[in-house]
Every structure is written in C-alpha cells, then in structure tokens.
Image (cartoon, rainbow, N blue to C red):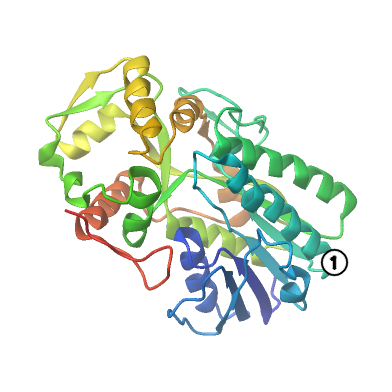
Amino acid sequence: MSSAVGSRVVVTGATGNVGTSVVRLLSEDPGIKSVRGLARRTPAWSPPMTEWAAVDIASEEANLAERFEGADAVIHLAWAFQPTHDPAVTWRTNVLGGIRVFEAVAAARVPVLVHASSVGAYSPGPKDRAVDESWPTHGWPDAAYCREKAYLERTLDVFERDHPEVRVVRMRPAFLFKWQSASEQRRIFGGRFLPGPLARPELLPFLPDVPGLRVQALHTDDAAEAYRLAVHADSARGAFNLAADPPLDAAVLGELLGSRPVRLPRTAARSAIAAAWGLHLLPASPHLFDAVLRLPLMDCGRARTELGWQPRHTATEVLQEFLDGLQKGAGMDTEPMRGRKVG
C-alpha cells in the first residue's frame, strides 16, 4: 500500500448511489488532501475537504482535462441508466462521455484511473460456480447497459496499451444497494410512481422463481471502500470483482421475505416485463432482464488478496436495508438521490 499522504482525487458522477459513498469515504480518509466532485448539478450536501463542479461529461464543451489538472487519481463513476427506449442518448453519456474522461486523464497526466465497470460487462456465464476476472467481458449485446460497459472495457484495453504510465483499475461490482439509494433506484428501475410501501414482505404471498434468476449484491459503502483502497494501492492494476455472499435466488429471498417460491417460466416473466416496458410503465427493459438471467457469479478473491478488501455487509443484510429504504422513501440531499415516498 502507498504511504503517500495528500492525494487529490476527482470523482465523476459524485452525487449518485456510488458517488456519494465514495466521496464520503474519501473525505474521511486522512491520506486524502482534497476531493473534487463532478456532477451535472451541484448538491447542497457538503462533506469535508470536498469541492463541487457542475460538469456534463456528455457535452463536447466540457473541459475535463482542466478539471483533472493536478489530480493524483480520477475515479470515473458517471453513468446514465435512462432513457432505456433511446439507447443513443445513454451511449452519448456513457460511452462517448467515458472516452472523453479517459482522454482527459491522459491529457492532464493523471497517474491513476479507477473506472466503474460492472458484472454487466461479463459475457453469459455459470450460476453454479464463480468466475474470476479472466472471464470474457463482451456483455449481453441486446441490453444497452451491458453493451456500453463491455465497449468501455475494450476502450480501456487500448488506453492501457497506449498509456502504460497510467495505473488503470477496473471495478466490476455486483448490484449495489444502500438505504439512501432506495428512491433513486425505484425511479430508475421500477418507475417514478411505483409505491415504495409495496416492498412490504407481507404483500408477497408467493415469490416468482424464474430459472436463471440468481444474482449477487453488495452494499454501496462496501464497494466504495474498494475504490478508496485502489487509490492507495500502488501495485493494484486491472480488474477486481466485488460482491457479497450469499448469492440471491428465490430460495434465499423466500426465506428472507417469508414468501413461498413458485416456479415461473422465463417466457412468462419476460412477456410481462416487455409489455410493461413497451407501454412505458416500467423503465427496466426486457433486454436487461435477459442479461440478468445470464450473468455469471463472481469470485472476489483477488480484491480480498490484493486490496485487503472485505465486505462488511452480507447480501441479505443489504437487501433488508434497501427494502426498508423503499418503504420509507429514503434518499439524500443530492439531485439523483432525493428521497420521495409514493403511495
């Protein structure tokens, strides 16, 4: 680990689910001198040692190299999940904006780039065993989220070849939740008007058991700790899987929620999601559902060994906290994270 004190870190997407946790941990780290948070809208939230700048990475007018000048590390988290019906819009922010961030890192001579990739970058894989970071990252081509994460993986391959002086770290976390992200994630995936109180377990007499629906989860603060460790770890390069145990499937969720799993064919579940998405009642697309059914389980041994990282929360604890946040309309004092209780 690095013993240097006084690092200056720039965080893109600093006001979202992951960004707020990363900024908070960095602002509490005695080894960090200052944090610059970049977001489309500056928040009222003001953690120690943190300054804000309003920047839209999708804009060709954004002078990112100037924002990165003098930084010891850039943590790139900025990401747009919507509109799912117009993937060209998310492509401009996520892919073209990501490329602008990478180019600005090189132009400003920033020595460390930590990039938020995802389990969604992985090609279809097994659900009965865990894969390490060598598993192919070609994504699921029909889902814009996976397609964009995979494209940036290829872009970083070229970036690392052309800029060996930059230490590049790629974080590949599982699905990330925390209490404060509940309102934001309800709007992103369930829709603006989905009532949070419907998350009460007693309203679920049975739980759909869809073949292949076995995924991993992680508390956002635990993921943020891995980002913080990566800034300090001079030898850390390449990809790191991040997830907590146990994997979540119908059996685990049924026990957690006190609901009885009932087998539901993939086609029936997908048809319902496709119909709701087609009517603009559900933001999450059926293509993302297809991808989730095919995501591999991840082995996180490398993060534990090389970063000294260990999640503090189990996946079931994460889900319980998130469901509580849904019911209470939890949020934070930033534009993406604002709380709102519906119903």
Q: Position of residue 339 (x, y in %)?
A: 30, 64
Q: Position of residue 229 (x, y in %)?
A: 59, 63
Q: Position of residue 303 (x, y in %)?
A: 58, 49
**Residue at 67 percent of width and 29 percent of height:** 136
Secondary structure of the residue carrying numbered label 1? helix
Q: Nearer the viewer, residue 105 or 187?
A: 187
Q: Residues within 10 Å of mark 1 (few under 14, many from 20)?
A: some
| Image mark count | 1
The quarter of the displayed image where residue 163 is located:
bottom right
Q: Does residue 6 appear left or right of residue 281 in this picture?
A: right
**Residue at 35 percent of width and 26 percent of height:** 275
Q: Nearer the viewer, residue 305 or 153?
A: 153
Q: Does residue 288 appear left or right of residue 72 in this picture?
A: left
Q: Nearer the viewer, residue 23 or 275?
A: 275
Question: 128 above or below 196?
Answer: above
Question: 140 above or below 14?
Answer: above
Residue bearing mark 1: 107
Q: Position of residue 84 (x, y in %)?
A: 49, 41
Q: Is residue 1 visible?
A: no
Quarter of the figure that contains the N terminus: bottom right
**Residue at 70 percent of width and 39 percent of height:** 151
**Residue at 38 percent of width and 44 percent of height:** 189
